[in-house]
Image (cartoon, rainbow, N blue to C red):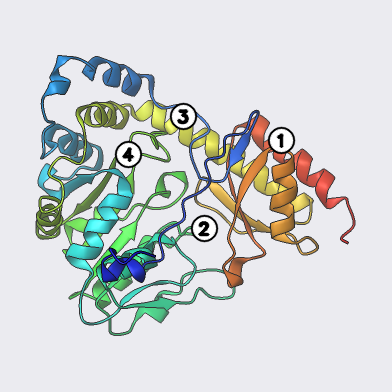
Amino acid sequence: MSRFWSPVVHRLTPYVPGEQPRMTNLIKLNTNESPYGPSPRALAAIRAATDDTLRLYPDPAALALRQAIGRAHDVPAGHVFVGNGSDEVLAHAFQALLRHERPLLFPDISYSFYPVYCGLYDITAQTVPLDDGMRVNVADYMRPCGGIILPNPNAPTGMALGLADIETLLTHHRDQVVVVDEAYVDFGGESAIGLTARHDNLLVVRTLSKSSALAGLRVGYAVGHPDLIEALNRVKDSFNSYPLDRLAQAGAIAAIEDREWLANIRERVIRSRDRLTDSLGKMGFEVLPSCANFVFARHPDHDALTLAQNLRERAIIVRHFRTPRIAQWLRITIGTEAECQALCDALADITAIPRA
């Protein structure tokens, strides 16, 4: 605490990112990064952009990147907004579109950055409990609100809503913005981007950090009606007109255009996820049906925190949340086949030890 802090700083509870440990021979399955590298075309584009033009500011409108995103999703560039990772895009959306007198709705088990943004921007929120099966029940959102934000697939559960449910929300809340956070949609969910053509209250947020294996480049984007995009641009240009540097824009364009590489990574992760789900089930774990690049699992006879600690002793890192409702669950990122096998071998050894 400091007497120099602004009042808002005293009441903030900052987001806690996944650990980035410095351990040798580490199997890192805690932050949902891709186990495979980015497109070689993206790496080549980044190298090519490392030249004398770095003395110049990047295009503040990122037009070429927005055009590439538009081509990928069959939408005009004017319907696309880009930012420094999807977290920045979401932050602008909270301030530009979700700050109203009525409360913002989102699931009680969801991306833990949402309540942080509410605290930062003084947004009243109501969390809506997932059902006993850890699913979002759309009927629970049919109440007065200032807006809705849903991760789809949800994090950390990995479970997804179908487009019919999303459209039900959009139709019922025609005068409120519904933000659908699709960070993990490429691994099995249905993208709602196609719905933006007929629903002017829908904003879909995506990232290149997961399926495009570019978490280190920090590129996110949103697709929606131009009125929503204009609101985001007004906030961006009141904060930082140049959020994406020349290297990020060049690499992102190349990655988006390399659809074959994206499809390859996606299919490899999905296959590994299915095998890991099966293996965990055979060891007695309950595993939620995942449409993401991670699984959410618990064991009826072993404490989740203890499992995480025991795995760490074997240089395997998974994510454990201390939130009461999910304190007995582990979120496990899908790694390579070898990493998933090492995880299963370790868990088989750990769970064979009787509980103290």
Circle nearer the viewer, 4 or 2: 4
Q: Secondary structure at mark 4?
A: loop
Q: Which amino acid does the dot numbered 2 rest on?
A: Pro
How many neighbours does mark 2 have within 10 angstroms: few (below 14), some (14-19), or many (20 or more)? many
Q: Indicate the position of residue 103 as horizontal and vertical percent values.
A: 29, 79
Residue 284 horizontal side relative to residue 268, left or right = right
The quadrant of the rendering that contains the C terminus is: bottom right
Q: What residue is shown with label 3?
A: 264
Q: Earlier in the sequence, mark 1 or mark 3?
A: 3
Circle nearer the viewer, 4 or 3: 4
Query: Is the Cβ of the residue at disc 4 closer than 8 Å to that at disc 3?
Result: no
Give how far apart the Cα atoms at labels 2 and 1 are.
22 Å
Give how far apart the Cα atoms at labels 4 and 3 are.
21 Å
* Numbered circle sitting on residue 65: none
**Which residue is at a point 21% across and 32% down the rendered structure image?**
245
Q: Which amino acid does the dot numbered 1 rest on?
A: Gln
**Which residue is at a point 40% across and 37% down the rendered structure image?**
215
Q: Secondary structure at mark 3?
A: helix
Q: Which amino acid does the dot numbered 4 rest on?
A: Arg
Query: Is the Cβ of the residue at disc 1 closer than 8 Å to that at disc 4?
Result: no
Foreground residue among 168 and 102: 102
Q: Which amino acid does the dot numbered 3 rest on?
A: Asn
Give how far apart the Cα atoms at labels 3 and 2 are.
24 Å
Give how far apart the Cα atoms at labels 4 and 2 are.
21 Å
Q: What residue is shown with label 4?
A: 218
Q: What residue is shown with label 1?
A: 341
Q: Secondary structure at mark 1?
A: helix
